[in-house]
Image (spheres, helix red, strand yellow):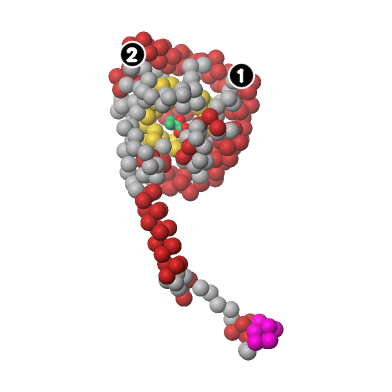
Amino acid sequence: MPNASTFLDMKRRGEKIVVVTAYDAPTARIEVEAGVDIILVGDSVGVNILGYAHEREVTLADMAHHIAAVRRGAPEVYIIGDLPYASYDTIEQAIKSSRILQQAGADCVKFEGAAPELVRALTAAGFDVCCHLGLESQHHDVKRRQGRTAQAAAKLYDDALALDAAGQKFLVLELVPQELAARITQAIGAPTIGIGAGAATDGQVLVVNDLAGITAREFKHNRRYGAIGAALREAVASYARDVRAGRFPEEAHAFHMADEERAAFERGRGGEA
Ligand code: KIV
């Protein structure tokens, strides 16, 4: 079973770490078959699966439910689970929330923001902690690129160092300039996992709905590796056409009663055997 040192070793060897989100068991199983290193059960589940308008609507119960599903689909994979909005406002609450995610199957808990004291407390309580800087969907009202001015970049850099000194096991960098992500990646011990942060991070993460072509919107940071949304739409439309035209189901899709059972049934109903 992989653990945080597995990925630290990958960073040291210069091997890229492949991370992707999953929210359900079959997708998790397929991702493992495809060779991913880590599955992130992110609070992006809210917008991508649950139909919420914002990540802030995601609850701890939602996260535990989806982490448990991913764990059932991928018993051996290393899972990072998001602590949802307002579930880590105090250290006591963060520890309780992390325990719930761990019991659901998470190997590591992720939270957004620069809170080294939280990393220290969670680490002391026995949790692997993944931090998340740059765009923080839970805390930023507008989803825009971060760290673009020298001052903003310096703050992000200092925060990354402080989180590292506190014992983070990973750092997600979202929507930050490539130069800044590269400097942070060189400066800290923990592997950096980038999304919209350029090519220099130790690993990359994408939202599965975005990479598979389920999400309708296009994002600059994403590459579509499939057209699953279009394929699913076409599959369901074909099914609907066939049902309406009487082409589905066919004889091959039906099953039959044994002759004697059918005869007894018909006799019982007063029909002809
Ligand atoms: O929730 C999520 O999927 C994330 C990624 C965007 C990194 O945090």
For residue 165, say whether it is visible.
yes
**Label 1 belongs to which residue?**
90
Q: Would you place residue 67 above or below residue 198 in this image? A: below
Q: Which badge, 1 or 2, is on the more N-terminal residue?
A: 1
Kindly identify which residue carries mark 2. Answer: 149
Q: Which quadrant: the C terminus? A: bottom right
Answer left or right for 85 relative to 252. right
Q: In the image, what residue occupies the spot 51% across and 15% down?
A: 116
Q: Quadrant of residue 143 in the image?
A: top left
Q: Nearer the viewer, mark 1 or mark 2?
A: 2
Q: Quadrant of ligand 1?
A: top left
The single residue placed furthest to the front in the displayed view is: 244
| Label 1 SS | loop
| Residue at 33% from the left image edge and 11% from the top image edge | 150
**Could you tell me the amino acid type at mark 1?**
Thr
Ligand 1 within 8 angstroms of badge 2 C-beta? no
The range drawn in magenta is 265-271
Amino acid residing under circle 2: Thr
